Image (cartoon, rainbow, N blue to C red):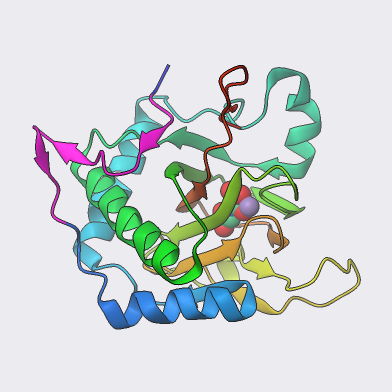
């Protein structure tokens, strides 16, 4: 069982706080401003290429070790229904590799920036590596059901260098729950592109991919646990 929950502020290696990778203040201001105004934000080249390379290596290591698990996404009794909604392999980040730890430090900076500006009281962050095999997809969905107050802000970071238009796998984002509407934006999953979305409000979908498509999906959450009810991780 991997560590799924990473408490805010706990991103340390060998007892030392990790140095955050650069996400400059102007970038994070723009991201948080767009999130507040539109419900989503997209930033290209948000992450230094060196960190992308480390994250790709970490993700591939998980794949090669057989640690990516399609069943890990849904609970068992939901599994058959789940495979019609999404076909993607996933593994939780636990911060044990350098790239993961640096990425989690960056997410922690974003968590603080979002709370400072939007007063969302985001408490923790959890994230998965996602590997879509050729033919993989994720149909239109919300990351969190309204009222559950669980996942509040979703983050996606893409890890695909040299992605071609013909590879498909675009992320469609809608700014309304009206099924008939056209997407507000369509994002190519190029390495370094970072997306934020309000988890309860912004429907999104991954079009079928024709190549192996890697990324990280993460969720900033509020703590809804009470003394007699432990908040489930999914
Ligand atoms: C998700 C998700 C988007 C992507 O994991 O919930 O919407 O581009 N991922 O992989
Ligand atoms: Mn999603």
Q: On the rendered structure, is 174 left or right of 209?
A: right
* Residue 4 can be seen in this image: yes
Query: Which residue is at 54% across, 37% downward?
Result: 89
Of 84 and 229, which appears nearest the observer? 229
Q: Quadrant of residue 79?
A: top right
Residue at 42% across, 24% down = 66
Screen quadrant of the N terminus:
top left
User: Relative to residue 1, is residue 51 depicted above or below?
Assistant: below
Residue 110 x %, y %: 36, 62
Left or right of residue 204: residue 102:
left
Q: Residue 159 is drawn in which quadrant?
A: bottom left
The location of residue 176, given as percent across then percent down, is 79, 71
Height in image: 206 above or below 3?
A: below
Total marks in image:
0
Q: Magenta stretch containing residue 8, yes or no?
A: yes
Q: Is residue 165 visible?
A: no
Among all residues in the image, which is located at the extreme front?
227
Q: Nearer the viewer, residue 132 or 108?
A: 108
Coordinates of residue 121 in the picture (x, y in percent): 48, 53
Q: Main secondary structure of the magenta part?
A: loop
Q: Residue at x 72, y 62 (%)?
A: 201
Residue 195 higher or lower than 43, as above or below: above
Percent x, y of residue 128: 46, 41
Q: For the magenta stretch, what is the residue range?
A: 3-19
Camera-nearest residue between 145 and 116: 116
Point 19% across, 58% down: residue: 20
- In the image, residue 144 lies in the stretch drawn in magenta: no
């Amino acid at each position: 069982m991997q560590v799924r929950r990473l408490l805010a502020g706990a991103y340390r290696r060998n007892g030392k706080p990790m140095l955050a990778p650069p996400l400059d203040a102007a970038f994070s201001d723009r991201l948080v401003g767009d999130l507040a105004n539109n419900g989503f934000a997209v930033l290209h080249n948000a992450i230094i290429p060196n960190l992308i390379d480390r994250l790709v290596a970490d993700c591939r290591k998980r794949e090669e070790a057989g640690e990516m698990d399609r069943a890990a996404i849904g609970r068992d009794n939901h599994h058959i229904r789940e495979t019609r909604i999404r076909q993607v392999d996933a593994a939780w980040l636990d911060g044990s590799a350098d790239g993961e730890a640096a990425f989690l430090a960056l997410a922690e900076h974003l968590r603080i920036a979002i709370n400072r500006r939007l007063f969302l009281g985001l408490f923790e962050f959890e994230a998965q590596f996602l590997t879509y095999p050729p033919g993989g997809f994720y149909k239109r969905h919300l990351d969190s059901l309204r009222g559950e107050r669980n996942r509040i802000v979703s983050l996606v970071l893409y890890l695909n260098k040299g992605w071609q238009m013909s590879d498909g796998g675009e992320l469609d984002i809608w700014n309304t729950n009206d099924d008939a509407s056209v997407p507000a934006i369509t994002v190519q999953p190029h390495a370094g592109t970072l997306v934020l979305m309000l988890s309860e409000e912004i429907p999104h979908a991954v079009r079928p991919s024709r190549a192996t498509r890697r990324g990280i999906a993460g969720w900033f959450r509020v703590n809804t646990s009470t003394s007699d009810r432990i908040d489930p991780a999914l």
